[in-house]
Image: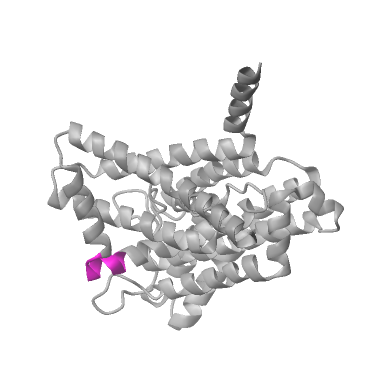
Amino acid sequence: MKEKKHSQHFGVKAFNSVMPVILAFVIGAIIIAIIGGNPLETYKVMITKSLFDMKGITRTLQVAAPLLLTAIGTSLCFKANIFNMGIEGQMIFGGFMAGIVGHYLTGMAPLAHKLICFAVSIGCAVVFALIPTMLRAYLRVDEMVVTLVLNYAMAKILEYLASGVFKDTSAGYVATAPVQDSAKFFLMGTSKVTPFIFISIIVFIIVAFIMMKTRLGYTITAMGKNASFAEATGLRTRRTVIKLMMMSAVIAGIAGAGHMLSEKTFYTLDFSGSPGLGWDGMLIALLGRHSPIGIVISCLFYSALKTGVEKIGLYTSVPNEIVSVIQGLIVLFLAVQFMDERYGFMEKFRNKISAKKEA
């Protein structure tokens, strides 16, 4: 009986994850057809060039590396009902500082240089995360609002620094100077992937193990289901809030440094992309239902979308922006689903209909 219930629960979760994607692709197909394109051909190019081509696969894995970290970092907090929206700000701050250290420290051994860059990035991300963490833990200030505001504040601060104090005077746009070769992760052979992918996978496995197999993981699940009950039964929720927010910041710092040293190598205003690696990670975490396996699948799918957009314009007449439309639709449907799960709108609606029928 328990196995049957577990199977049904898994089926519902899988259905809830797949439905937003299916709906987004259906509406995307309609839009493609309206503008005169071939939906099947477009989707075929998107999938085959990102998942069934060696260069495409390695490029997809490279794109997935920071997303895997921002997704598991988001999930670590969200699963405990701590709505930390600050991964983006922490990641770009860490990445920016890793780039500064990567450029201004010279004459270092490659391993030592990279380790210092990662340490600085993690330290900066953690310090930045302390503000919303302490406010949430000790004053019960809504962490969602604080972290959202701080993301944009940090983006503006870094824009000022990149266009002034640390501006690369040889660049014709807002950018910092590139990191030294000793700090860079170079592509492996003829592939499109750097060694950072292995760091990302190792960190992901460690965090997944903590979430699934440790006492802290049990506490996270308990807090997610009922924070008041978890506190009443002796689970130190304040301490757990601090621990989770700090762990999430460490992961964001690793993602920022890895992205800087392997993908960008200098800071620009589009360092994190659009809408941003932190926001993309949040989408992947929601799509994966905060399950490590679900996050891996969602991350590969989402990374394939981002890789596929680079090929659509080359092989079809459909503009690349169609992928942004699909991503936006997935976000919309996930947001509706998230709000329904949190506030039970559909259940209330069904109860009203049942009450009217009985009356």
Q: Position of residue 240 (x, y in %)?
A: 74, 58
* Dominant secondary structure, magenta: helix
Magenta highlight on residue 55: yes
Q: Residue at x 60, y 71 (%)?
A: 209
In magenta, the rendered stretch is 52-59
Quarter of the image where the N terminus is located: bottom right
Q: Residue at x 40, y 53 (%)?
A: 271
Given the current orientation, which residue lies at the most extreme top position?
359
Q: Position of residue 329 (x, y in %)?
A: 38, 38
In the rendered image, the vertical position of residue 27 relative to residue 90, given as above or below: above
Task: Tell me if 127 is positioned left or right of 174 in this view.
Answer: right
Q: Position of residue 324 (x, y in %)?
A: 33, 42
Q: Residue at x 39, y 48 (%)?
A: 269
Q: Residue at x 60, y 64 (%)?
A: 250
Q: Nearer the viewer, residue 275 or 159?
A: 275
Task: Tell me if 218 is positioned left or right of 91 in this view.
Answer: right
Q: Nearer the viewer, residue 21 or 347?
A: 347
Q: Position of residue 254 (x, y in %)?
A: 52, 66
Q: Quadrant of residue 213?
A: bottom right
Given the current orientation, which residue lies at the most extreme bottom position?
109
Task: Tell me if 130 is positioned left or right of 281 in this view.
Answer: right
Quarter of the image where the C terminus is located: top right
Magenta highlight on residue 288: no
